[in-house]
Image (spheres, grey):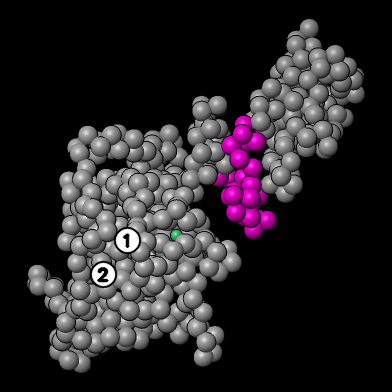
Amino acid sequence: MTLPLETIIGLEVHAQMSTRTKMFCGCDNDAFGKAANTTICPICTGHPGTLPTPNEEAIRTAIRTSLALGCTIRKECHFDRKHYFYPDLPYGFQISQYDFPLAEHGELKFDIHNHSGNILHESTCRITRLHMENDAGKLTHRGSTTLCDYNRAGTPLMEIVTEPDLRSAQEAVAFAQELRRILIALDASQADMFKGMMRFDASISLRENGTEKLNPRSEIKNLNSFKSLEKALQYEEKRLVALWKECKGPLPHNITVGWLDDEEKTKILREKEEAQDYRYFPEPDIPPLYFSQKDIDEIKSRLPSLPRERQQQYISLGLNEKQAQQLIDQPKLCVMFDAVYKKTNDAKRAASLVLTQLLGFLNTQEKSVHDGPDATALLELIEQIDNGTISAHAGKEVLEAMTQTGKSASVLIEEKGLRQISDDRIIDDLVQKAIQENPKAVGAYKNGKKQALGAIVGWVMKKSKGQANPEKVNAILKKELQQ
Ligand code: ZN
Ligand code: MN
């Protein structure tokens, strides 16, 4: 039996901004993998008497992201103190934004795909707000001991809050993936999930189809991957449906749950009626921020084209949806495709080189795009093919070796002796020999059997160990046989 229930989902996304320094001090923002407590200073560890200074690069990054999400930038915003106690929070409060956030009222359009990567339909989710805040440190629990690492404390975050517009786990994941693509395209965040640079809190509730009222929700905290976002929402949806049947209705009040990745289930963290009291009040050490329309317009005019727009551009060049998707999912592939297309003006060739050959070789070697050649190296290879130094066939072999060794195309061509024979005199000699050695094929060709030419060309290619330029062989052979 399916109840006539509708699933309502909203997300809160935290994304670490890819700035050089932290949100309110000059410490290195790239602390991942560094020794504990080495990228800290008295400001980001909340020593008394220090003053936070907002990072202009972070503010610009957050504005850029807000504009790309269609938000309105408030002319005035300010920071607030959000109080709570936890050992990873040295200040005893987080510097966040409460009632005057940086930006509001945006929306994000995204595509829902089927399993083969084709677009099924478009969906929209409204963005409630985007605000800036700093991150807390990191705790490591070892038995009865807990270690504090404050390297991450003070890292600049954007918190992006959506309206409850998402209707399934699948939709929530598609939204989150599109948001990630946008963050990467804007260079606003590396959004590396493995490094915790993008994290989700997901709220889910049920209501009877056709009703408008929002029922109390279950909020799932701190989901670190698309997989856990999807699984946690599916699990909680099932649980809420079962509860609805049992209790003939929705949850009596909001609850907060955590997702247990290993056990693949949620567990209740807090069950209470009222919101936590964070004692928000305006941060007295940082003056309000004011933005002029001119500032905002200037930032807006320099926004790059966004992933879905680029996808449409690639499709209009003749790529299929899946290929276009592959490109926008990996900005480095985009750069390479664009460079090859610019040089060759041939989208099919660029797609085959970048998506079929290059990606194929990297996948077989279980390497990432970042381990492979860059656009310049790829262009050098194309140059060698197009100027006749090597054949297109040898080009594949060279590309594979490039992915294996990291060497350049020209070095590999010499090492492997793949240089193509384009010297007319050498090819002329080979063609003369071919005519002598293949009287049958020559006779057939002269009697009008045009495909007999292939056998003679094949003989030349074999004799030259594949190194004769096939186009030249063809041309010279035809000329000889016409005489
Ligand atoms: Zn610092
Ligand atoms: Mn937050």
| The magenta segment | 355-379
The answer to whether residue 482 of the structure is visible from this angle is: yes
Q: Hey, which quadrant is residue 375 in on the image?
A: top right
85 versus 170 height, above or below: below
Please name the residue that numbered disc 1 is placed on: 133
The alpha-carbon separation of the residues under discs 2 and 1 comes to 10 Å
- Name the residue rendered at 26%, 69% in the picture: 82
54 versus 375 height, above or below: below
| Placement of the C terminus among the 4 image quadrants | top right
Q: Position of residue 103 (x, y in %)?
A: 22, 52
- Name the residue rendered at 21%, 45% in the picture: 290
Q: Position of residue 28 (x, y in %)?
A: 50, 55
* Residue 389 is covered by the magenta coloring: no
Secondary structure mainly formed by the magenta segment: helix
| Placement of the N terminus among the 4 image quadrants | bottom left
Q: Hey, which quadrant is residue 464 in on the image?
A: top right
Q: Kindly check if marks 2 and 1 are in contact, taking CB atoms under 8 A apart as contact.
A: yes
Please name the residue that numbered disc 2 is placed on: 82
Q: Is mark 1 within 8 Å of ligand 2?
A: yes
Q: Is mark 2 within 8 Å of ligand 2?
A: yes
Q: Residues within 10 Å of mark 1 (few under 14, many from 20)?
A: many
